[in-house]
Every structure is written in C-alpha cells, then in structure tokens.
C-alpha cells in the first residue's frame, strides 16, 4: 500500500487516464472497486465443469475493468490481508448463487502464505461458510515459492482448515526450486502445473516430460493435478493422455464476471449447451 502511495506522489506517476497506469490497492479497497471474476476448471476426460478459480479485478469508474497487474504489485501486507479476507468472504457468498443453478462447484481462491497465519481464516470459515450439505468446500491456492519458506508456520493452520473442508493447492508447481519432500509436510490436495510447462506440451519434449513427472507425482501421493493455461486442443489431449485430471485456460473459458458464469449455469439447467470453444461444447456435471 505504501508503495502505491509513493507512486501516487511521484513525479513519474501517470494519471489514471493512461490505461497502463498503476492504481494503489488501497484505493481499490477504499472505493470498493474490487470484484471477483471466475475461470472454470474442467475435468479433461469428460469435459465436465468441476470448479472455478476466483480472480481479482478492479472496476474503475473511468477506466473500466483493471487487471491485477496494475494494482497488486507493490501492495503492502495490510492491504493484501484485507484483500484476501474480502476474496474469501465474497467467494463463499458467491457459491450460494452458483449452487442455486444446480451446480455446486468447488471454488478456489489465491492466498498469500502469510495470510494463513495473519488472518483468522478458520474463524471466517466457521462463520461464513455455506451450510448446505452440497457445499464441497473451498480450495486455497498458494504458490510453491512462497509456501516452501513458511512450512512450519502454515502447517498447524492448514490442519485446522482441512477440518473445515478447506484444502490447500500448490499453485505454479514446478516453477520454483522446492523439494516435494518438504512440501508433503502440508495437508495439500492439489498440484497446479505451471503454465510455462503446459505450453506446447504436445510437441515440446522437455515440457511434456515435466508434465508427466508432476502428474505421476500427484498420482503416487493421491493428489489432483490441474494444468493451467491450456490454449489448444492438442495441449488438452496430451495432458489427458498422461493422466492430468483437471485443466483451465482460454481453450475452455476466459475469466468472466459472476453474472456471466451464473448465466451459463442457468442455461445448463434449461438443457442448453455451454460453449467453450467454437467447435466444441462444455458440459456441466
């Protein structure tokens, strides 16, 4: 937050009229410009919709939708904790709207590792989680490079979260230099393959080998493997052939506002097909 304020009063600061100008996260939170968009997660074998990842956006009064790259970098710890709390509570509330469409999908949110310790996440879940029996729980995604440095601090919190149907996912797996022997100390349930290894995995032997290794690792330890950033049917078919269970990316759907995803789910209830590419159709489970 302080970094954002310094940018504001810096001679090099560019007015908001510039589409590439940064916006302090503090301003996004203060003016309630924050909102969540959702990107579907697809079971690769059946093409069923099985979940969605919540992604932050800012709806600026003059600039419209602003991506996180323009308001998250440089944000202070307090502002990030406030944002994380809002993301979790908003996602828990949004789940009710999705469930009304007859599709109780599991939602995932990105969380800084520090927030696992600094925020009362177990209390938040006890008070705000949906009470419906069909609620499948919540997934908290933490990046590999962050979590490997705070394993001891996060372990007790992670154990208590699991009791509340909240599991951890290791995001961008393979991008860091961590040891899986250390990571398996945490009760996480999902590995997300970094998009850098998913790209062109059907032709790039190095990327294909890394994807196969991560999928096999997940299989041995009973973890769900999710491929990020799938953009072509060739990548999707390759990942399915090596046993990757879930995928997300522009091939299936771009991140969308909650209302748009609700509309797709309602269309499914009425028996209408849900498009995910020009040629194919997405089916909700």
Image: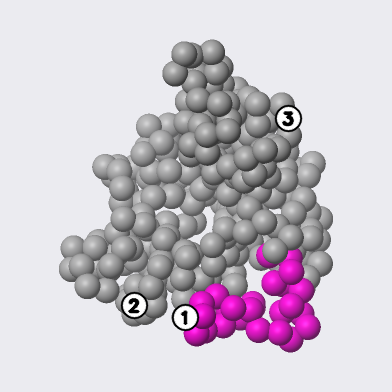
> SS at mark 1?
loop
The residue under label 3 is: 31
- Relative to residue 158, is residue 172 drawn left or right? left
**Secondary structure of residue under mark 2:** helix
- Mark 3 Cα shell of 10 Å, populated few (<14), some (14-19), many (≥20): few
Residue indicated by mark 1: 45
Label 3, label 1: how many angstroms apart (C-alpha)? 43 Å
Disc 3 and disc 1 in contact, CB within 8 angstroms? no
Cα–Cα span, label 2 and label 1? 14 Å
| Disc 2 from disc 3: Cα separation | 43 Å
Quadrant of image for the N terminus: top right
Residue 226 shown in magenta: no
User: Which residue occupies 65% across, 31% down?
Assistant: 28
Q: Residue at x 70, y 63 (%)?
A: 260
Rendered location of residue 15, percent (x, y): 55, 26
- Furthest-front residue in view? 17
Residue behind mark 2:
234
Q: Is residue 70 visible?
A: no
Which residue shows up at 43% across the image and 43% down it? 143
């Amino acid at each position: 937050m302080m970094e954002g304020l310094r940018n504001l009063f810096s001679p090099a600061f560019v007015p908001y009229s510039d589409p590439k100008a940064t916006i302090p996260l503090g301003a996004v939170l203060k003016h309630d410009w924050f909102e969540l968009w959702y990107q579907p997660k697809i079971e690769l074998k059946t093409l069923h919709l099985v979940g969605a990842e919540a992604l932050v956006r800012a709806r600026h009064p003059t600039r419209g939708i602003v991506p996180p790259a323009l308001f998250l970098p440089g944000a202070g710890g307090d502002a990030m904790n406030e944002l994380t709390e809002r993301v979790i509570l908003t996602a828990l509330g949004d789940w009710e709207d999705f469930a009304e469409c007859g599709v109780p999908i599991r939602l995932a949110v990105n969380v800084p590792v520090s927030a696992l310790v600094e925020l009362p996440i177990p209390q938040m879940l006890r008070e705000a989680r949906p009470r419906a029996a069909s609620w499948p729980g919540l997934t908290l995604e933490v990046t590999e490079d962050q979590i490997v440095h705070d394993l001891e601090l996060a372990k007790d919190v992670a154990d208590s979260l699991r009791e509340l149907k909240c599991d951890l996912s290791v995001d961008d797996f393979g991008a860091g230099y961590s040891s899986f022997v250390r990571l398996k100390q945490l009760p996480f349930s999902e590995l997300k393959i970094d998009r850098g290894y998913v790209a062109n995995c059907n032709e790039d032997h190095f990327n294909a080998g890394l994807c196969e290794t991560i999928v096999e690792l997940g299989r041995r330890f009973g973890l769900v493997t999710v491929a990020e950033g799938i953009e072509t049917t060739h990548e999707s078919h390759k990942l399915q052939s090596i046993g990757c269970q879930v995928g997300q990316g522009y091939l299936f759907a771009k991140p969308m506002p909650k209302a748009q995803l609700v509309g797709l789910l309602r269309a499914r209830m009425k028996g209408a097909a849900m498009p995910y590419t020009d040629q194919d159709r997405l089916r909700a489970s």
